[in-house]
Amino acid sequence: MKSFLLLITILFSNSIIAHEIDKPPELWSWFKDLQKPKAACLTQSFFALSEVGLENTTQNEYGFYGDIENNRIVVKCLSTDSNRSKVMVAVAGTNRKSVESLRNNIIKLIN
């Protein structure tokens, strides 16, 4: 009987762990029109991401991609005309509070 209870306990705990691993990530995003050109958006975004400690950074013509702990961050800047741009911030991760907080911190630094 003890071994049966132990087996049930192990199976149940493994299914909980597997459920946590398979849980989809949280995704928090934000978009804003800026009254500055794309180059200024990219510069401000770079400094904002440096401030929050972005690691494994990749940059292309549109923006930045990287990681902070277990979160994946994307910040893109798109030109809407010569003096205006649109910025998009997206943060994904498994911890809701961490994802939301990180997104909010990046937004404050870009505004």
Image (spheres, rainbow, N blue to C red):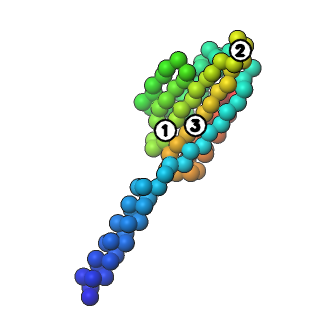
Mark 2 falls on what kind of element?
A: strand
Residue 26 seen by the camera: yes
Residue pointed to by mark 1: 72
Q: Which mark is residue 81?
A: 2
Q: Which mark is residue 7?
A: none
Marks 3 and 2: which is nearer the front? 2
Q: CA distance from mark 2 to mark 1?
A: 29 Å
Q: Is residue 5 above or below residue 49?
A: below
Residue pointed to by mark 3: 90
Neighbours of disc 1 within 10 Å: few (<14), some (14-19), many (20+): some
Indicate the amino acid at tag 3.
Ala
Q: Residue at x 34, y 76 (%)?
A: 9
Q: Quadrant of residue 35?
A: top right
Q: Residue at x 28, y 77 (%)?
A: 7
Indicate the amino acid at tag 2.
Asp
Q: Left of 69 or right of it: where is 62?
A: right
Residue ranking furthest to the left:
3
Earlier sequence position, callout 3 versus callout 2: 2
Residue ranking furthest to the top:
82
Indicate the amino acid at tag 1.
Arg
